[in-house]
Image (cartoon, rainbow, N blue to C red):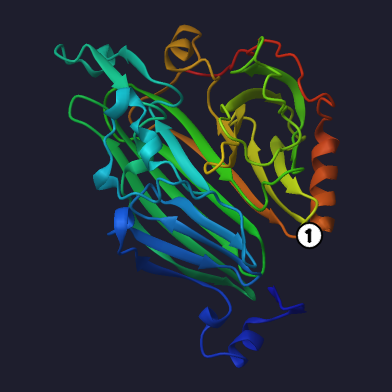
Amino acid sequence: MPQLYGKMMSRRALAERSGALSQFAGVRLMELSDGVERGIRMLEFRSGTGLRFTLLVDRAMDIADCDYRGQAIGWHSPAGFRHPGLHEYEGEGGLAWARSFSGLMVTCGLDHILFMNDVPADNYVYSPKKSVSHSLHGRIGTIPAKLTGYGERWDGDRCFLWAEGIVQQAAVFGEDLHLIRRVEIEVGTNDIRLSDRVVNHGFYRTPHMFCYHINLSYPVLDEGARYLAPIRDVVWAAHAGEAYTAQGVGYRTMPPPRLDFHEQVWQHELAATDAGEVPVALVNDRIGLGFEVVTRKDQFPCQFQWQNFQAGHYAFGIEPATHHVLGNLAARERGEMIWLDHGEERRYDTVLRVLPDAGAIAEAEARIRAVSDQPREDYPAPSGNHLPIKGRG
């Protein structure tokens, strides 16, 4: 039974008070019609709590806007929500992905994540194709989905808003991977539930890598905002060495926007609950607003922290990943690449949760601290210990 406007409401009680649920909550399909966004189908969700978010159907069903009671949570970059038809995957030496990089969540994969790599293509059994050239974070994020359904589902007095779609990444003499995505939220809650399956529909043995680039910005990101995570070990930092403290920004507490800021990236080894869940959050105590991401350790054994505090690009990223920051070639060399034969799949179950007030922030912090404490210093020395990821093949 949803709680709306401070009152528990049955299905009948809601029906008595309106001609349609959409007066309070719902999901609807629309199309963007101007600038670089023109022609993109978009699903808008409203959960009835003041939470609103949108899915870009034509960009892998990724989450674009996200706001809570008028307060922005998801990042809008200068690139905008660019139509996939404008994207040039191999442009700028593989960095053109940044020209389509915007929104609360951008999916990376399905056969490559992280920086550019040329990798062997012998698994595709086609002699003219000696290698596959991968650009930054792979192809999936700019592929349109086939929208298979959306709407509302009642279970007694509980109502769930949902959408499903299939995103196919395929080539002749190459991969044929399907991302089957379901997004769901219960009316009266702030928990976005993301359920993904990646399935090999082809008949070549195919590599699989996967990552969510979850991007938060002002006002949840602001001077003094705190990153909370059950960190057992700080494994790696892109800016380690002499530059580690040069910008005066550590991993725990966020600064205001800066001029000439150089991005910072960490990989952390995170602990999990007894149920295998890994919760992390960015919280702003000043305004009583936060955002929590809960993943599964067996699905995403690695996680990165991205800080881009450049003025005009002000963003903080939470990046659960299937592989270490070492990249595609290293995953192959270490025996950690996921290889999918025909019909094989991997599942990913994630919760994205708005923390709407100081009480919710305190509860999230207690949950995270109960799993593991985190380093109290701002600049913990990276260990370089990329633990073996077992059970791959």
x%, y% of residue 183? 50, 55
User: In this figure, which residue is indicated by the disc labeled 1?
Assistant: 357
| Foreground residue among 306 and 4 | 306
Toward the left, the furthest residue is: 128
Quarter location, residue 368: top right
- Residue 91 appears anywhere in the view: yes
Quarter location, residue 139: top left
Reply above or below: 354 against 14: above
Dot 1 surroundings within 10 Å: few (below 14), some, or many (20 or more)?
A: some
Q: How many marks?
A: 1
| Foreground residue among 380 and 303 | 380
| Foreground residue among 222 and 75 | 222
Q: Residue at x 17, y 16 (%)?
A: 126
Q: Residue at x 15, y 11 (%)?
A: 127
Residue 349 placement, left or right of 381: left
Residue 293 placement, left or right of 88: right
Q: Residue at x 36, y 68 (%)?
A: 30
Q: Residue at x 51, y 85 (%)?
A: 20
Q: Amino acid at mark 1?
A: Asp
x%, y% of residue 327? 47, 17
Toward the top, the furthest residue is: 333
Q: Which structural element holds mark 1? A: loop
x%, y% of residue 232? 77, 23
- Residue 199 appears anywhere in the view: no
Q: Quarter of the image containing the N terminus?
A: bottom right
x%, y% of residue 153? 52, 70
